[in-house]
Amino acid sequence: MSDRNVVLIGFMGSGKSSVGEALADSVGYSYVDTDKLIEKKTGRKIKDIIPTDGEEAFRDLETEAIRGLADVKRSIISVGGGAPLREENRKLLSRIGLVIHLSATPEEIYQRVKHETHRPLLAKSPDLRATIKDMLAKRAEAYSFADVVVDTTLLSVEEVVSKCIEILARDTRCDV
Ligand code: S3P
């Protein structure tokens, strides 16, 4: 297998972390999650950083974390759902590895996140379904730089991992 990294992008609840961990296990790569890197570096939780310092301050930490990944090898990297909003991040991520967008319908996202409380950008929404639909529409363009899209709607984590492995096997720069 080559050393090419895989970068997972996608909306909150698209399964980046669970798929990333399972995919890393399957292919014997390391797993890196930029939200975790930020929490480790700051000693604070994302759910406290965004409400206290503001989204832009969090985005700066996120870009810094992504810049720090330039030399990683043999890694599956997942980034927060808003990371592709910045052009600099999109350029860096494309350079780091094969970018896979894990997509899902707004309703599927809603079903996956409706009982969760750790995502500050969704936590206070008076109409979660509408917020998700609106944010997904606004982010569609930012996610479109991905090399490949995997629609995860109705798929289990294992099924998404299998699809990612098929994609890696077809990738000419990757020989899984
Ligand atoms: C965010 C997604 C979160 C986290 C932060 C902001 C976003 O990560 O980075 O709460 O803007 O979509 P997940 O996508 O892993 O939930």
Image: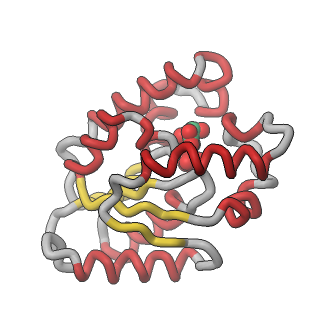
Horizontal side, residue 85 vs residue 175: left or right: right
Q: Looking at the image, which residue is at 48% across and 63% down? A: 102
Residue 37 lies, in percent from the top left, at 43, 38
Horizontal side, residue 127 vs residue 62: left or right: right
Q: Looking at the image, which residue is at 45% across and 76% down? A: 161
When the figure is inspected, residue 156 is found, relative to residue 101, above or below; the finding is below
Name the quadrant containing residue 60.
Answer: top left
When the figure is inspected, residue 16 is found, relative to residue 127, above or below; the finding is below
Dividing the image into 4 quarters, which one contains the C terminus? bottom left
Q: Looking at the image, which residue is at 44% across and 48% down? A: 141
- The residue lying toward the viewer, choosing from 159 and 31, is 159
Q: Residue furthest right?
A: 126
Q: Looking at the image, which residue is at 79% across and 54% down? A: 114
Q: Residue furthest top?
A: 53
- The residue lying toward the viewer, choosing from 127 and 35, is 127
Residue 101 lies, in percent from the top left, at 43, 61
Name the quadrant containing residue 134.
Answer: top right
